[in-house]
Amino acid sequence: MAVLAEPTATPAARGNPVLRILGKVSPSAWSLLVILVLWELSVRIGNVPAYMLPAPSQIFQEFIDYGHRLLPNAGVTLFEVLLGFTLSVLISIPLAVLIVYSRPIERMIYPLIVSSQTVPMVAVAPLLLTWFGYGMTPKIVIVILQTFFPIVVNTVMGLNSASREMIYLAKSMGASNWQVFWKFRLPQALPSIFAGLKLATAMSVIGAIVAEFVGANAGLGYVILVAGASFNITRQFAAIILIILIGVVFFAVLEQVEKLAMPWRRIAR
Amino acid sequence: MDVTVAPETTQETHISISGVSKTFQTRNGTVQALQNIDLNIQKGEFVSVLGPSGCGKSTLMMLLSGLDTVSTGRITVGKKHIDKPNPDAGVVFQQDVLLEWRSALQNILIQAEIRKSDMGEATERARQLLKMVSLQDFENAYPKELSGGMRQRVSICRALLHKPPLLLMDEPFGALDAMTRDQLQIDLLRLCSESDMTVFFITHSIAEAIFLSDRVVVMSPRPGRIEKIIDIDLPRPRRLAMREDPRFIEYTRELTDIFKSLGVFREEY
């Protein structure tokens, strides 16, 4: 969580050196710490059994004891997420370009895209399992299905956000359609495209876990399912934390890429 | 200076607009934006088109730039019949349409990139233009970091990079405050004085039209027609103090009376 926050010091922390050091730690790290402490205390004071709610310390112990099995499974999930996401981007952005540039294609495809989003992935997953087996393929497909919608919609919106005057300007310079796309529309669309990609990061993790739930022999979703069958709540929590970590780190990495891709956005007015 | 390129000395028709009408189809039927426009503009002439909103002056500029096509009539610029975007012209809109992802210098250079001109030469010319409008220290600034007046100056430099024989401007100073506007009018005249470029300038400011132009074309609304053409016989270089010149005041009175007779101004209350 800490990686999400901007490294800004609060104005109050400027004077006192102790406060200044404390201020360097992001506020979300503090809130996380408070939650963990309250959690630990209430489990211990309330004598809550581990099969109901394990304390953070017990979950930490689980990482140490069972990490050698958790990490490879996390690797499987991570691979599904990254490969599915990458393929989704490679499909969605060209698709969005087609939609923007071709009215017939827009009218043919857009309603299908929208209606595809009304079908819950859990309902589709068994079908995909029947077609593609228990391996990696149905997971990748579900990640793609889960993520392409926000990417397509935001890219379409971004590509359409170039103003009429901007297109006039390009045309008045004698720009070809390709130049209008490459030098005007695409850079203009970048902020929206990244908004879509960031939404898709969360969706991709959800997609991978849902797919693993329906049928898998590896991955964090599979770990949760197996641990649940034996009432190992602590292991479930450990797996959930790894899922969160994958999602958050993925999001943070993308945010850094976004900053590098659009240096002009960092300038404050 | 400019006196040498005044229309009287170079009797060469640059722009010829003959019998031009333009109608638009809207939901409420056909709207006639321009009716039977006849206008010849000499090479190197500064012509302002003055009129209230809805008199079709922007439409006329769209037709001149070839971004829109005439319903009837014919437009030629130089020897060229205009029926598609004419990349010989430089175009400036009321919005500066700067590309947020490019620095001031890069924004000017897009003109050269689209035209695939020599970039070394273009960069030199762009720097020279920036200097002429006192923005030499801002070549690396992003548009976000510039004020409205600075942004519009960059957009004028962009329009002039390829030394266009014709500059088309659609209310370029309409969104600026009065003082910035005064400065930009002078900047524009300075830029114009370096070549024998023809300028077609749209405005709804009487004072601006008189101050800048060799001729003022008065248009009346619904449908857009040319009401009157007035020669402005003031010496160049123009100075802000000329706005108190008796001749200037006389032109102002004459133009105001025309708009009163057209019902654009109604004074009784």
Image (tube, grey):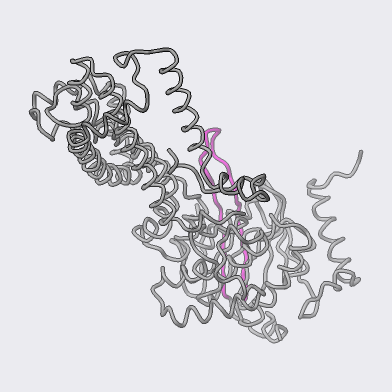
- Return the residue nearer the eye: A120 or B19: A120
Q: Is residue A11 left or right of residue B116?
A: right
Q: Which residues are magenta?
A: B14-42
Q: Is residue A268 magenta?
A: no
Answer with the quarter of the image where residue A198 lies: top left
Q: Is residue A118 left or right of residue B236?
A: left
Q: Position of residue A56 (x, y in %)?
A: 37, 27
Answer with the quarter of the image where residue A212 lies: top left
Q: Position of residue A164 (x, y in %)?
A: 50, 50
Q: Is residue A25 above or below residue B138?
A: above
Q: Position of residue B85 (x, y in %)?
A: 45, 62
Report the predominant secondary structure element of the magenta stretch: strand
Q: Is residue B49 above or below residue A76?
A: below
Q: Is residue B24 magenta?
A: yes
Answer with the quarter of the image where residue A40 lies: top left
Q: Is residue A245 above or below residue B118?
A: above
